[in-house]
Image (spheres, grey):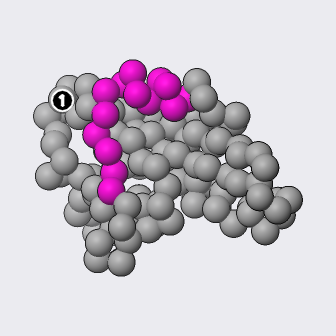
Amino acid sequence: MATKKLAFVVRSLPYKTEASRLALTHAISSQTVEIYLNDGDLVEASVSYVSDGVFNILKNQQGGKHYGITTNEGHAKNTLLLDLKVLICKEDLDKFGLTGENLVMDADDLGGDMKANIVPYSEIQKEMETADHLLFC
């Protein structure tokens, strides 16, 4: 039995680039690879929001209204719905004056159980160090 750890680190803004959306899409799709694995093998993915990336997980995004595009809010909820580990950098939230009240912290409205975690950067660093594969976006 082997577990492959995947770490997705979202550090870019949620608009004017597809990078952050692609990170969330890859994290979500990583959960479907189990059908290709040997019995007992697992994939464990995490998503960490750092720097400007914390803006990807804001509640009540208005991308559709202002830009005619969907927001990352729905993607963020889907990561939680799939029980992915979601880490949000506390130092960056403090820098931008944000709190958990401003963020998508759960997917309760979709029936999800998982909660996002606001953690110090040192915890995100540990997550990156223990990952077999790391994607920065």
Q: Residue at x 77, y 54 (%)?
A: 41
Q: Does residue 73 appear anywhere in the picture?
A: no
126 relative to 135, above or below: above
Q: Which residues are magenta?
A: 115-128
* 23 vs 29: above or below: above
Residue visible at 69% across and 66% down in the picture: 32
Is residue 118 one of those drawn in magenta?
yes
Q: Please, what secondary structure does the residue beneath circle 1 have? A: helix
Q: Quadrant of residue 93?
A: top left
- 66 horizontally vs 28: left or right: left
Name the residue: 28% across, 56% down.
105
Q: Position of residue 49 (x, y in %)?
A: 40, 39
**In this image, 105 relative to 22: left or right?**
left
Q: Position of residue 38 (x, y in %)?
A: 85, 59
> 16 left or right of 129?
left
Where is residue 28, by image quadrant?
A: bottom right
Three-letter amino acid code of the residue under disc 1: Asp
